[in-house]
Image (cartoon, rainbow, N blue to C red):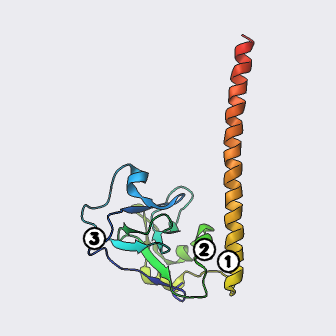
Amino acid sequence: MGKVCERITRKNINNESDLPLTIASQYGLIDQRDFFNKIVAAKDMSNYYLLKKGEFAYNKSYSKGFDYGSIKRLNAYEQGCLSTLYICFGITSDDVDSDYLECFFDTLKWYSDITMICAEGARNHGLLNVDTKAFFDEVTISMPSSKEEQCMISAYLKNLDHLITLHQRKYKLLRKIKKYMLQRMFLRHK
């Protein structure tokens, strides 16, 4: 990972941003106010990391279905503030497509490397004990050498995600229609 990405430790020193971010494994990097319905960040976020759009963050907290945390890219905002508990990083290589990297981290294929670098191999108060240097030295990114192929793979996966979302919406709508129709049928036959 360290060959194509570097750690971001840029601080929000001048309070460039007042947007407190959190990682929700299923939704990505989002505003804490939307996720928690409140701000859990400190009032003074000048010591928080300042993440810019297109940069990534690793949340070492586990959640349902994400036993070793999650890595998400900042997509929804131009910039925001993250606790220093996160490992933030950006792409440094012109040979890596950001969309591909986002898709790669959604696969959880990188978990096998994380399991090897957890200091105790267990959770510590909800946070994994992951050494930052080892994170960049030991986590490998599987990717085609051609940026064009990376772009094709990420476009295919994004289209597939979109199709799945459409089918899930259709399924929910059909369930509502079915429920409505059943209620009407039972009311008629009373």
Residue at the spot 26% in from the left edge and 74% down from the top edge: 14
Q: Is residue 121 visible?
A: no
| Quarter location, residue 145 | bottom right
Residue 172 lies left or right of residue 63; in this view the side is right
**Judging from the image, what secondary structure is the residue with disc 3 in?**
loop
**Judging from the image, what secondary structure is the residue with disc 1 in?**
helix
Vertical position of residue 16 compared to residue 30: above or below: below
Task: Specify which label sits upstream in the sequence, 1 or 2.
Answer: 2
Q: Quadrant of the C terminus?
A: top right
**Picture coordinates of residue 98 (x, y %)?**
58, 77
Pointer 3: what residue? 15
Q: Nearer the viewer, residue 153 or 139?
A: 153
Can you tell which mark lies on residue 99? 2
Residue at the spot 36% in from the left edge and 63% down from the top edge: 19
| Quarter location, residue 48 | bottom left
Neighbor class of circle 2 (other Cα within 10 Å; few <14, some 14-19, many 20+) is some
**Picture coordinates of residue 94 (x, y %)?**
57, 88
Can you tell which mark lies on residue 151? 1
Can you tell which mark lies on residue 32? none
